[in-house]
Amino acid sequence: MVQAYILIQTEVGKASTVAGTISKIPGVIQAEDVTGPYDVIVRAQSDTVDELGRMVVAKVQQVDGITRTLTCPVVHL
């Protein structure tokens, strides 16, 4: 199992809508709108890194109102 945090910047006023939409995507554990340099932080999981990448590109980045994403895979050192 691969998990990652996805940091998202949105258009002004869209954070709540984006978080709500993303929270319904399969594989998303949690989506919260936050303050600071990012507007939404998502925790997601998938079986492989490739599946995670497909989720981010094909589903998350297609949500209306998103301007930029940064995916941070969780590592266990």
Image (tube, helix red, strand yellow):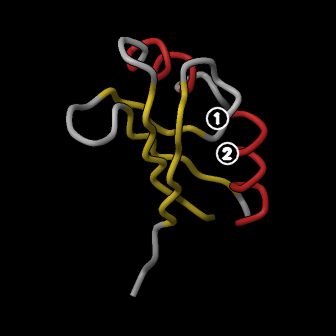
Q: Position of residue 33 (x, y in %)?
A: 32, 26
Question: Dot 1 lies on which element?
Answer: helix
Quarter of the image where the N terminus is located: bottom right
The residue closer to the viewer here, 2 or 13, is: 13
Kind of residue at disc 2: Val
Q: Position of residue 70 (x, y in %)?
A: 50, 53
Q: Quadrant of residue 64?
A: top right
Identify residue for label 1.
60
Q: How many marks?
A: 2
Kind of residue at disc 1: Val
Residue sitting at 42 percent across and 80 percent down? 76
Q: Quadrant of residue 26?
A: top right
Question: Dot 2 lies on which element?
Answer: helix
Q: Cβ–Cβ below 8 Å for labels 1 and 2?
A: yes
The residue closer to the viewer here, 15 or 26, is: 15
Question: Quick check: 69 left or right of 60?
Answer: left
Question: Quick check: 73 left or right of 37?
Answer: right
Q: Is residue 53 above or below residue 55?
A: below
What is the residue that sits farthest to the left in this orientation? 35
Instruction: Give the Cα separation between the discs numbered 1 and 2.
Output: 5 Å
Q: Position of residue 25 (x, y in %)?
A: 65, 28
Identify residue for label 2.
56
Q: Residues within 10 Å of mark 1 (few under 14, many from 20)?
A: many
Q: Is residue 15 above or below residue 42?
A: above
The tag on residue 23 is none
Residue sitting at 37 percent across and 17 percent down? 12
Q: Position of residue 39 (x, y in %)?
A: 34, 32
